[in-house]
Amino acid sequence: MTVISDATAWGHMDGWGWGMAGFAMILLVLVVVALVAPSLANRSADPKPSMRRALEVLAERYAKGEIHRDEYVELKAELER
């Protein structure tokens, strides 16, 4: 019957335990960065297309007579700030 002491039970990986743990952490960080980076890139995209669309909708509403000139001028100035 063989008895394994505590000293040999912890040495079963011959020093690779911390190396593999470090590798796993680096791999985890790379995966998280790969998943998060695209969404951060979209946030920094130019918001001007949506601003142009808002001004187009405002002009359309003015052209249709849904809003008066004073309201159009006020809202346009607010959007262009």
Image (tube, helix red, strand yellow):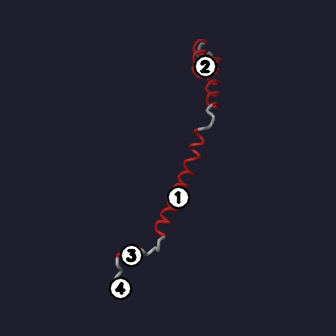
Q: Classify residue 52 by image quadrant.
A: top right
Say if 10 sits above or below 40 in the image.
below
Nearer the camera: disc 2 or disc 3: 3
User: Looking at numbered disc 3 in the image, what kind of residue is underneath it?
Assistant: Ala
Choose the circle earlier in sequence order: 4 or 2. 4
Choose the circle earlier in sequence order: 4 or 3. 4
Helix, strand or loop at disc 4? loop
Q: Which residue is mark 3?
A: 9
Q: Nearer the viewer, residue 54 or 16?
A: 16
Crowd rating for badge 1 (residues with CA inside 10 Å; few <14, some 14–19, many 20+):
few
Choose the circle earlier in sequence order: 1 or 2. 1
Q: Classify residue 79 by image quadrant.
A: top right
User: Looking at numbered disc 1 in the image, what kind of residue is underneath it?
Assistant: Ile
User: Looking at numbered disc 4 in the image, what kind of residue is underneath it?
Assistant: Thr
Q: Residue at x 58, y 39 (%)?
A: 43
Choose the circle earlier in sequence order: 1 or 3. 3
Gap between marks 4 and 3 measured at Cα: 13 Å
Q: Which residue is mark 2?
A: 76
Q: Which residue is mark 1?
A: 26
Q: Residue at x 60, y 16 (%)?
A: 72
Q: Which residue is mark 4?
A: 2
User: Looking at numbered disc 2 in the image, what kind of residue is underneath it?
Assistant: Lys
Q: Residue at x 42, y 74 (%)?
A: 11
Residue 81, how many percent across, how many down?
59, 22
Gap between marks 2 and 3 measured at Cα: 74 Å
